[in-house]
Image (cartoon, helix red, strand yellow):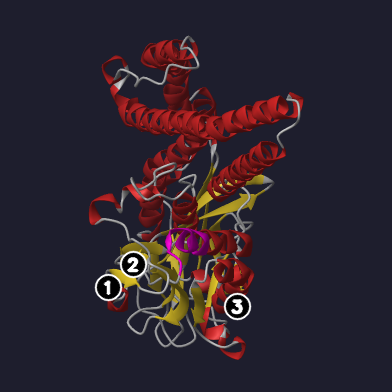
Amino acid sequence: MLAPLLLLWPMSVLLTWLVAQGIANKPFDRALGDMAQLLATQVSIDGPPNQPAQARFSLPAAAAQALHTEPEDTVYYQVLGLRGEFLSGDRTLRVPDDEARAPPGEVRFRDDILQAEAIRVAYLWVDMPVGPGQSQPLVQVAETLGKRSRLATEIIKGVIVPQFVILPIAVLLVWLALARGISPLNELQQRIRRRDSADLSPIDEREAPEEVSPLVRAINDLLSRLDRSIRTQKNFIADAAHQLKTPLAGLRTQAELAQRELDAEPPKVQQVRRSLQQIARSSQRAANMVNQLLALARAEDKEHHNLNQTVALGRLARETVQDFVPRAMDRRIDLGYEGPEPSADAPLAVRGHPVLLLEALRNLVDNALLYTPVGGTVTVRVLPDPFGQVVVLQVEDSGPGIPASERAQVFEPFYRVLDSGVDGSGLGLAIVREIARQHGAEIVLEDANERHRPGLNEQAGAAFGPGALFTLRFPAWTPDE
């Protein structure tokens, strides 16, 4: 605040000087105008009969003495007749221009230079009748600016000198007030600096200045969200460690069993082969889990997202279905695609990250194939929504379905439906939810179509449940955007 005060002080001096000039001019202009009107009363018109009128000016001794009573300034006057002829006074005074001509009897003022000295001039045209080709007599009275400058200087001194006393006092008071007002902020700063990095408890608002209470509340809200994020991350790491521990422990156990069988006499080849198969399955499970952990981390990483690419959702769905056809055939599952042909992909384009969208789609199809019994059906659909500006992606299966009470939990990391009989990591749907959130998509889980009523597949001997239908609604994008 000291810099603005020091900047405003010279501006105050300048404004004071301008105001002082105006104050000093007013009384002296009034006196100068009165003097000009007094001289105008001494102008008369007379002349012989049948002769052009002549202007006459007679200056009484008292009036002449009044013109020279100012010891500090020099007074000049000039009187011109009906034809502009010089009648009395000082010939060197400049005659006003025609643009400056005023109505008769009206006093006007101007600043001028006479003998290299600034003067103030009051002038008027005398109001009296004149003949053709004649103009009213002109009266001018001028004086130098000595007493005006002295009065302006006294006014400035009267204002500026107190400011030399007031300004330092104001600066001192501002300094003390700010120091006192900021001291609670300094204390708050020290309390925050002394905090342990693991202490995310809220800051006590009662000990903070009232002016920064909204800031403290915002920081507390940030600390609360950060605490929840860290707790979630810790729980996620703990769950991931627990989930990885099982296949790794299985790997170790099966490796020890295989070693023992190889050390036996004679080696038991069948038991070694089974142990190696278990090792392969456990390693595959661990690798799948690590890949899904990496996919989830990539989906949650906002810094590396590029969601401004145009992605043809139909093409992405067709390629995904083609990739999963061999696996569906191994399990005798009818895997199909319903959607636009390649030439009609443009109206079903979305803005997004193609790798993330592919990851979400692969997880949905993989989840559907995992839970659909042999002989079941899995369908991937891409279609426009006629009631809104969205593109709909659906993955439908004829598996056991998900109870309504558990549909919110299945999107949490490492959550799996109980008694499903399916081996998985519980990360696939969590990845799908995060990718959908990043793309502004809405995800809905419900029972599949009515054609998948609970029943028994007589050929495969597998029981079909109500099925699950995952629907994602992405904001549509058109080339005009």
Residue 286 included in the magenta stretch of the image: no
Where residue 75 appears, as percent x and y from the top left, is 52, 44
Mark 2: which amino acid? Answer: Phe
Looking at the rendered image, the disc whose residue lies closer to the viewer, 3 or 2, is 2
Q: Residues within 10 Å of mark 1 (few under 14, many from 20)?
A: some
Q: Quadrant of the C terminus?
A: bottom right
Where residue 100 appears, as percent x and y from the top left, is 50, 69
Residue depicted at 39% across the width and 34% down the height? 225
- Real-space Cα separation, disc 1 to disc 2, in angstroms: 7 Å
Q: Residues within 10 Å of mark 3 (few under 14, many from 20)?
A: many
Query: With respect to residue 268, does 305 lie above or below?
Result: below
Looking at marks 1 and 2 on the same chain, the residue that comes earlier in the sequence is marked by 1
Looking at marks 3 and 2 on the same chain, the residue that comes earlier in the sequence is marked by 3
Residue contact between numbered discs 1 and 2, judged by CB atoms under 8 Å? yes
Residue 453, which numbered label?
1
Where residue 229 appears, as percent x and y from the top left, is 44, 34
Mark 3: which amino acid? Answer: Arg
- Real-space Cα separation, disc 3 to disc 2, in angstroms: 30 Å
Q: Residues within 10 Å of mark 2 (few under 14, many from 20)?
A: many
- Look at the magenta stretch and give its main secondary structure: helix
Q: Residue at label 2? A: 464
Residue depicted at 47% across the width and 14% down the height? 168
Judging depth in this view, the residue of 386 and 38 nearest the camera is 386
Q: Residue at label 3? A: 315
Residue 371 included in the magenta stretch of the image: yes
